[in-house]
Amino acid sequence: MSGLLVWTNPAARAAERVVLVVGPFNRSVEVQELRTFSEGAEPQGLIKTALNLANVQHEQARSALNKRVDIPFTLLGRLLYTDVGEAFLGRMAKIFYPRNAPEAGVPALRSGVILSVAQNTGRRLNSVDFLESYPNKEIVVDVPRLIYLLNRLTSIQEVGDFFREPF
């Protein structure tokens, strides 16, 4: 019976920590801290330190965390199971993956995205909602690869180019 409760309650499986990895070094931040910051609180701990080191304004970071992408739920479900969706998830799974099971990155990402959109009344995807729906207690973020991705994705054309070239 308790196994059934865990299965039916997504919060019981949701990410609790985001582990930021740079080479052999890692630091983690609680997802709840990200939620609190995204809702208007002043940044604390690692969030504050990272924003100061990166010279990023608090409102700019908060806006990025709260950015929502509108996507029809049925289209999302179909897209994630196409060859293009698989390729996209495969690339993203090199950046975001479960801490103790990196080989499960693709299904974990797919699950997190689908659950996040399904549970959101506006059928929108945003980063904090995604983290709260991610099906593992810790999600690793490979920071150098994430920075590489963000630097490359300045246009739709570059999105296509990014997925055609190797890391």
Image (cartoon, rainbow, N blue to C red):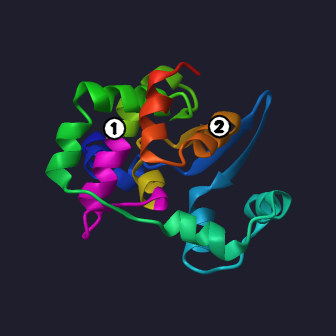
Q: Which mark is residue 148?
A: 2
The amino acid type of the residue labelled 2 equals Tyr
Which residue appears at 78% of the width and 57% of the height? 50
Question: Could you say which quadrant of the image residue 84 lies in?
Answer: top left
Q: Which sits earlier in the primary sequence, circle 2 or circle 1?
A: 1
Q: Position of residue 162 (x, y in %)?
A: 50, 31
Does the stretch in magenta take in 13? no
Q: Which residue is mark 1?
A: 110
Decide: is 23 above or below 48: above
In this image, 158 relative to 17: left or right? left
Q: Could you say whether the residue bearing mark 1 is in a helix, strand or loop?
A: helix
In this image, 22 relative to 34: left or right? right
Q: Residues within 10 Å of mark 1 (few under 14, many from 20)?
A: many
Report, in whole angstroms, how far the alpha carbon at label 2 lies from the one at label 1: 22 Å
Decide: is 40 above or below 75: below
Q: Which residues are magenta?
A: 111-128
* Secondary structure character of the magenta stretch overall: helix
Q: Position of residue 138 (x, y in %)?
A: 56, 41
Q: Nearer the viewer, mark 2 or mark 1?
A: 2
Which residue appears at 48% of the width and 34% of the height? 92
Which residue appears at 48% of the width and 52% of the height? 131
In this image, 15 relative to 82: left or right? right
Does the stretch in magenta take in 117? yes
Quadrant location of the N terminus in the rendered image: top left
Q: Residues within 10 Å of mark 2 (few under 14, many from 20)?
A: few
In this image, 46 relative to 77: left or right? right
Which residue appears at 40% of the width and 38% of the height? 109
